Image (cartoon, rainbow, N blue to C red):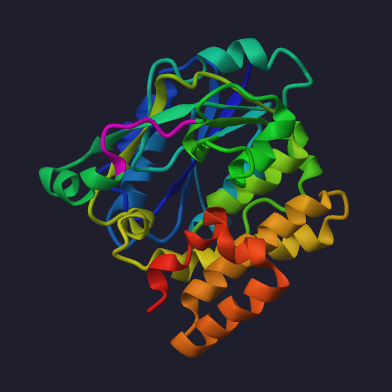
Amino acid sequence: MKISVIIPVYNAEKYVSQAVESALQFEEVFEVILVEDKSPDNALQVCRELTKKYSRVKLYQHLDKGNHGAGATRNVGITMAEGDFIAFLDADDYYLPNRFEAEKKLLVNEDVEGVYGAIGVHYYSEKAKKQYYKIFGDRLTTVYQKHPPEDVFPGLLNMKGTFGLFSIDALTIRRSALKKVDCFFKTHLKLHQDTEFLFRISYYLNLYPGILDEAVAVRGVHENNRITKVDAREIRPASTRVILWEEVNNWAKTESSIPDDVKLHITRVYRSFRIANSHFLKKWGMIVRYLFTDYQSIRSGLYNINFRKDLF
C-alpha cells in the first residue's frame, strides 16, 4: 500500500513540521507532498529543511511561485502524487497512530474507492480555546453510523436525517478512481473548496466508513484559521455558503444522472442562502413568492434554518 499525503502549506511555519512527522510515522506513506503557496512567514524555509531531513518529503510550489489558494495548491499535489492512494492533511493538523488502520483492510477490495473516518480537535492556545470551544468543544467530527456508499452523497447534503460529516483530513482515496471526477478542487472558490470536493466525490466514488467512533486525525484550532472564523460567525456564514451552494447547484444542473429530488433539494438550500444574503425588501419578496410557488422550501426547518436568523 503506497499512500501519497498531500499538505498545502500557507502561513504554517509553526505547525507544518508536526503535520509532516505525523504522516511519516506510517510505513504505508510512500511520500509526503508539501505544496508551498507563497507564505508570508518562514514556512518555505521550514519545508526546505524538512526535505533535507526526510527522504520521503517532497516540496513543490506553483509554477509562478505565487499564492493561489488551498484548492489550486492541493491540485498541484494531486498532479504530482505517485502513490496508489491519496490522503490529505492541512499543515496545522496532524494524524494519529490509527490513521490508516481501517484503510489497510478496506482498500484491499478494488470496489472500495475511498475511506473516511473521524477527526478530533486540538486548541493550540488558551486564547483559541476560549474563542472557539463553544463551536467545537471536544467533539468528534464524524458520520454517526456506518452507511453504504450510495447514502453518503445524500447524507452529506442533509437528506438522510442526522448523518454527520467527515473532514478531508480523514479521507483516503484510490488515485485511479479520481479519473471519474471531471476536475479536482475548484480553484475559484476561496473557502469551502474541500466541502464542494467532498460532495462531488461522494457522488462519483464508492466511499466506505472507516473508524467513526474515535479520531484518526486532529484538527488544529488557532486564531488565524479562516474557516474557523466562519464557523464562529466572525465571518457571516451565509455570505460564504451561498457561493458554495451556487457552485453545487450549477454542477448538479449539468449532471444528468443526479435524481430530480436531489437537484430540487440542492436548489432549495442554495435559495435559502440567497434569501439570507438579500437586502430586506428583496428577502421578504422572495419569501412571499416561494410561500406560494414552493411552500416546502420556506416552511421546512431543513431550509429556513439558513435564513430565519437574518430576517430583519
In-front residue for pair 222/139: 139
Magenta residue span:
136-142
Residue 46 in view, yes or no = yes
Left or right relative to 178: residue 152: left
Left or right relative to 239: residue 226: left
Residue 272: % across, % down? 56, 67
Q: Is 30 in the magenta?
A: no
Q: Is 139 in the magenta?
A: yes
- Which quarter shows the C terminus? bottom left
Residue 66: % across, % down? 48, 66
The residue at 71%/29% (across/down) is: 149
The residue at 54%/23% (across/down) is: 145
The residue at 68%/40% (across/down) is: 153
- Which quarter shows the N terminus? top right
> Which residue extends farthest bottom?
281
The residue at 48%/72% (across/down) is: 276
Left or right relative to 275: residue 130: left
Magenta segment main secondary structure = loop
Residue 63 in view, yes or no = no
> Which residue extends farthest left?
126
* 71 in relation to 118, above or below: below
Residue 152: % across, % down? 66, 35
* 90 in relation to 119, above or below: below
